Amino acid sequence: MAKSVVEVKNIWKSYEIKRWGFKRISFYALIDVSLSVFEGESVGILGESGCGKTTLGKIILDLEKPDKGEVLWFGKGLKNLTKEEYKIFRPKIQAVFQDPYSSLNPRYKVSDILLEPYLINVEKDKEKGLEKAKEVLSLVGLRVEVLDKYPHALSGGERQRVALARTLMVSPSLIVLDEPTSALDTTLAGQILELLKEFKRSFNLSYILISHSLPVVLYLSDWIIVMYLGRVVEICKKEVFFETSHHPYTLMLLNAYPDPFSPKALFSKKVKGEIASPLFRPTGCEFHPRCEEAEKFCKDSVPQLRKIGDSQYIACFKR
Amino acid sequence: MPFLEVKDLVLGLKDKYLPLVDKVSFSLEKKEILGILGESGCGKSLTGFALLRLFPPGITRYSGEVIIDGISLYDLPEEEVLKLRGRKVAIILQDPLSSLNPVLTIGEQIEEVLKYHFNLSKEERRERAIKLLKEVGMPDPEIRIKSYPHQLSGGLRQRAMIAMALAGEPELLVADEPTTALDVTLQTQILELLYELNQKKNLSIVFISHDLGIIRWIANRVCVFYAGEIVETAPTEELFKNPLHPYTQTLIESYPKEGKIKKVLKGGVVNLAEKPKGCRYFERCEISCEEGKEKHPELISVKKEHWVRCFKYG
């Protein structure tokens, strides 16, 4: 059986904001979220902005601490890790962010950007580090000359390749990809996606892919998790994605996505309203104000994730 | 006569001769939606701005004409252009937060346009602004009219910007990637809104985007830009069913379909500063024909309304 790389168990996360001057209000960004990622497997998290998908990514990376619940790296709870263990595991979980302009230090040359994690986490040997850097650069399809360049001299696509190369310097097991291609053109996005797929195969990498783009998630993930307002509303295996019925919200996302392979849309007004503010959560099923199939009882209680078939979980009373 | 006609438009740098948009010509009938498709840096936004006689800093027009409803835009004195902008042709941009004024309420910004173009009393202006917000689907327009841009969500901001663009009752709308900063669900809503305005108000739209899906959804006809040139133009369905230029073909095949990508477009766009002599797509082209190395292909008509810039076809 494959080993789990990251597990998240019943995570709750709240934030506090100041409103009306001094009054503090807290709201939940994540409610009872669980997931696990096994070796060589990739999980795509799909949802609109404000659904908590980035917060989940941060918690998995241990950049934020959950209020309740547990995060496990390689089967060990983060709270119980010793300092030495943390030092070993930490570099195994890496991240690539959406904006390649703000995630690279503008005062560092590419060589420094790549060397820094290597010198800290692998070994303090600059020569070997540079060799590794050259090797990694050729993997991501960049020429060795970029080592002496600063990020501003690179294009968006090249920067995203550098960000990817940086994670590969420390031979990670899992990379959290937070909207890795949404700042890029279609053609560049295609190139980056192809690279990611190749690395997954050749290094047995796991991914947690956070995106609002359905084609990107479908291309790269084995499992698809759909989130709405901090809750997981559907988990579905990719193989059956086009064969089964879905949560009404997933259907809404499916309908909203402009598909270049089908003719002109008829604009059937399938998308209603906007995502509610987590400050004022709708009662019952949070999706009911936008749901076409909503009925009276949807307002009263929250549906739980239920297993449907072998490879799908849906949180909806009507499924 | 077409409503909008662009003839051999050449745009480029101010301080040295470097055409970034090279001899672009297209036309648009009334109530038509023209899609302009291309990667970043291909000159699609520059072309969009030029339709309002606007240029980003450092950019200027070398030659060419833009004729809107029989009026030649570049022959007019500057004051006349000001009257035309917003009234005949308006623009909406990608990022509504940076293109709305943060210290004015959206009501004030819409009323400013009304004040400039029409002779209305204060009350009439307010009434008109509320009506405009209602038209673009803003919930509670009477209350929202007093909101500042930062108080609105991304989708509502984009709606406010569309209301502002429509305030002068333009006949042509230039939409420069209006949904790129938005979520898919909001994107659909904004596209629906633009389509509705097109149908009900006979609004002509030039829709600029790099997203094939959006273009196929909304446009009647498409111009594909590559490195500052139009490489292919055809009615939307024809273009997607029967793409001719190798670039368009690869562009469509490189789009993820049901979890698979057929082909990936390798390499980057040619550097225009190096003044490529031959075909600008030569380096990335699968065919890489002999002629393309040295000679520059012309846009030729293959079928009715289907034009392509490639030696393969003649």
Image: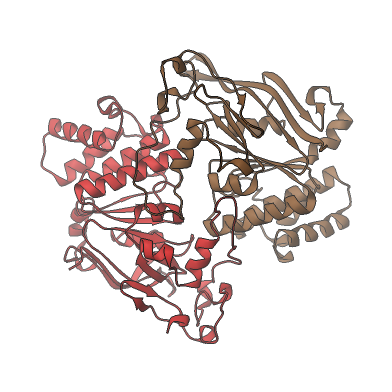
On the image, which quarter does residue A141 sit in?
bottom right
**Considering only vertical position in the picture, is B183 above or below B272?**
above
* Residue in view at x 61 percent, y 60 percent: A153
On the image, which quarter does residue A293 sit in?
top left
The chain that appears brown in the image is A
Chain B tint in image: red
Give the camera-side residue of B291 and B262: B262
Q: Is residue B276 left or right of residue B11?
A: right
Q: Is residue B297 left or right of residue A105?
A: left
- Relative image position of residue B135 (x, y in whole percent): 24, 37
Is any atom of residue A109 visible in this view? no
Quadrant of the drawing holding the C terminus of chain B:
bottom left
Q: How is the image coloured?
A: by chain
- Relative image position of residue A66 (x, y in whole percent): 68, 22
* Residue in view at x 87 percent, y 56 percent: A128
**Considering only vertical position in the picture, is B130 above or below A118?**
above
Is any atom of residue A309 visible in this view? yes
Quadrant of the drawing holding the N terminus of chain B:
bottom left
Give the camera-side residue of B43 and B84: B43
Give the camera-side residue of A153 and B133: B133
Give the camera-side residue of A108 and A175: A175
Q: Is residue A17 left or right of residue A176?
A: left
- Relative image position of residue A182 (x, y in whole percent): 54, 48
On the image, which quarter does residue B265 sit in?
bottom right
* Residue in view at x 38 percent, y 65 percent: B238
- Relative image position of residue B169 (x, y in whole percent): 19, 47
* Residue in view at x 66 percent, y 48 percent: A105
**Considering only vertical position in the picture, is B24 above or below B93?**
below
